[in-house]
Amino acid sequence: MNKIRKQLINTLDIVDFPELGKPYKGKVRDVYDLGDKLLMITSDRVSAFDKVLSTIPFKGEILNRIANFWFEKTNHIVPNHIISTPDPQVLVVKKAKTLPVEVIVRGYITGSLWREYSSGVNGQYGFDLPSGLKENQIFDPPILTPSTKAEYGLHDEPISRAEIISQGLVAEEIYVKAEKYALELFAIGQEWATKQGLILVDTKYEFGMVDDELIVIDEVHTPDSSRFWIADEYEYRFANAESQKMLDKENIRKWLLERGYSGDGEPPEITEDIRETLSERYIELYSQLTGKHFEKIVGSVEERILVNLKKAGYLK
């Protein structure tokens, strides 16, 4: 039995460290408030269409490692919230006042934007996309499609820059800076991805304020927040109207859509085979994106986190 298959029974789903208090539970992360900072535990949960579906072996560790890779690579351009990483799946971060919108940068028309566009929906971001676009066609330059940041279980909604400012969701000078940061991060991400034989297709960024400073929070360019395609297959697949080879969470969305599920009702059972396949895609992306080998260590993730948090002094 391979290590991914063995890890299926060891994935981190529900986190329970009562000594740290009651966590805020998101789709993937459980966040403990430590007063002047936050302790974020990245679980192995996988979600799609705003529903948590199952767990994926090694997913949380890969997300954290990739996020840290990007935070280190970009902190000279955009300040971020990282303080320390006491465990491969734990981040201790600055406590920020989160902006109530997500800034989404798209380099190609695909995913939800393509589904909206192909069904006749246009103009929801304050501008119209040109007619005649094809699925997976490049945007040059990339476009910004912000959305509201909904609570867990609710849907994010498209919103325009003008609405964000007129509704007082974010002050204009802060939102303009968030857009600037987002485009700078995306440019760095695309440049690096190209060197690694990948395409950074699109991504979402979350921002927050700490002592009147705008910083990037949550995660950057992970397979949960971004789409990645294999670069040398793009042109052929696009010319032949074929699906792109993806190394990100879009694989689970595609799998669900092929089974007629798009968020309503009961989702199909996430089998062990698809959980294993998704883990392989996450690991493949980590290796190709970072150039580093991912060591698959089988065992209880919760027990490892418990040991490391005790070592770091967060638990007794």
Image (tube, rainbow, N blue to C red):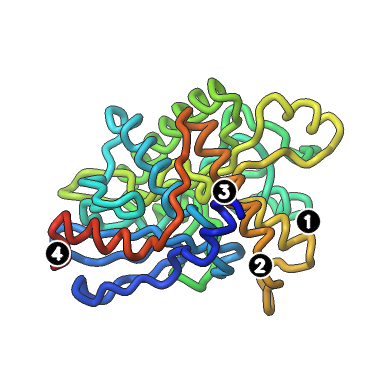
Residue where numbered disc 3 is placed: 126
Residue where numbered disc 2 is placed: 270
* Between discs 1 and 2, the one toward the N terminus: 1
Q: Residue at x 50, y 38 (%)?
A: 286
Q: Residue at x 62, y 27 (%)?
A: 140
**For discs 4 and 1, the disc positioned in front in the rendered view:** 4
Residue where numbered disc 4 is placed: 35
Q: In screen coordinates, is 208 left or right of 221?
A: left
Q: Decide which of 169, 230 is in the foreground and name it.
A: 230
Q: Quadrant of the N terminus?
A: bottom right
Q: In screen coordinates, is 183 left or right of 97?
A: right
Determine the CA span between mark 4 and mark 3: 39 Å
* Between discs 1 and 3, the one toward the N terminus: 1
Residue where numbered disc 1 is placed: 119
Q: Amino acid at mark 1?
A: Ser
Q: Position of residue 14 (x, y in %)?
A: 41, 72
* Between discs 4 and 2, the one toward the N terminus: 4
Q: Kindly state the secondary structure of the residue where label 3 is placed.
A: loop
Q: Amino acid at mark 4?
A: Gly
Relative height, residue 203 to residue 163 (above, below): above
